[in-house]
């Protein structure tokens, strides 16, 4: 998809128009907010893929509450950081603190080692296993598509500045 070139004039009037456009953006706060929103929207489909993968983790149907898989899926969110140190867009999984004392559930359910849990009713410990790589595998092959969506969000912001400058 070819992008439309942006005309930039280096005249006094063009520079004044650019400064006026930047002032209208309130020192860039509105621009940063809208860019972060655009980046989150660009990677939202991939966060939904990860949520669906979390819900597809096999269950033995113990029926305990709160449910582990929906709690993991609920904590999967797209995130955009526009700070100097951590600039980028990513899909983040929050810890599940209030789910049966199992705060590392997203990490442990995709581990090959599994996790240790106590058997209900006695003092025996056992190892449980989730689905190895459920989170990582949900992003296989989406790198170029995500990169293209993020580039589109960035081009929209550049177009917005250019339109205000004219």
Image (cartoon, rainbow, N blue to C red):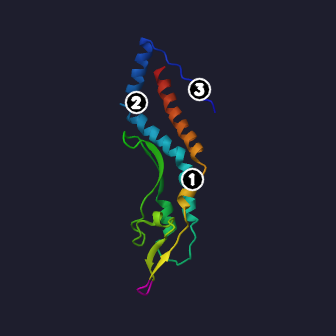
Asked if residue 157 is positioned above or below residue 8 in the image, the reply reads below
Which is more foreground, mark 2 or mark 1? 1
Residue furthest to the front? 113
Q: Mark 2 and mark 3 in contact (Cβ < 8 Å)?
A: no
Q: Secondary structure at mark 1?
A: loop
For label 1, count other residues whose C-alpha is less than 10 Å away and answer few (under 14), some (14-19) or many (20+). some
Q: Secondary structure at mark 2?
A: loop
In the image, residue 122 lies in the stretch drawn in magenta: yes
In the image, residue 10 lies in the stretch drawn in magenta: no
x and y percent of residue 75 in the render? 46, 59
Q: Which mark is residue 4?
A: 3
x and y percent of residue 148 in the render? 57, 39
The magenta segment = 120-124
The disc, 3 or 2, on the residue closer to the chain's N-terminal end is 3
Which is more foreground, mark 3 or mark 2? 3
Q: Secondary structure at mark 3?
A: loop
Asked if residue 161 is positioned above or below residue 46 in the image, the reply reads above
Identify the residue shown where x is 50% and y is 67%.
Answer: 109
Q: Nearer the viewer, residue 131 or 67?
A: 131
For label 2, count other residues whose C-alpha is less than 10 Å away and answer few (under 14), some (14-19) or many (20+). some
Residue furthest to the right? 1
CA–CA distance in space, label 3 to label 2: 23 Å
Asked if residue 5 is positioned above or below residue 47 in the image, the reply reads above
The disc, 2 or 1, on the residue closer to the chain's N-terminal end is 2
Q: Mark 3 and mark 1 in contact (Cβ < 8 Å)?
A: no
x and y percent of residue 24 in the render? 40, 27
Asked if residue 124 is positioned above or below residue 45 in the image, the reply reads below
Q: Name the residue beneath numbered marker 1.
A: 139
x and y percent of residue 55 in the render? 56, 64
Identify the residue shown where x is 54% and y is 23%.
Answer: 6
Q: Name the residue beneath numbered marker 2.
A: 25
């Amino acid at each position: 998809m070819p992008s439309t070139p942006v005309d930039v004039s280096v005249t006094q009037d063009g520079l004044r128009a650019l400064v006026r456009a930047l002032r209208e953006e309130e020192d860039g706060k509105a621009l940063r907010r809208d860019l972060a929103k655009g980046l989150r929207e660009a990677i939202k489909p991939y966060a939904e893929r990860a949520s669906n993968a979390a819900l597809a983790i096999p269950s033995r149907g113990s029926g305990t509450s709160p449910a582990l898989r929906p709690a993991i899926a609920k904590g999967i969110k797209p995130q955009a950081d526009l700070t100097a140190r951590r600039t980028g867009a990513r899909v983040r999984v929050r810890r599940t603190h209030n789910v049966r004392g199992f705060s590392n559930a997203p990490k442990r359910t995709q581990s090959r080692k599994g996790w240790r849990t106590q058997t209900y009713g006695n003092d025996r410990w056992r190892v449980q296993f989730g689905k190895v790589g459920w989170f990582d595998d949900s992003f296989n092959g989406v790198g170029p598509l995500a990169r293209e969506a993020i580039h589109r969000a960035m081009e929209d912001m550049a177009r917005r500045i250019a339109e205000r400058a004219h």
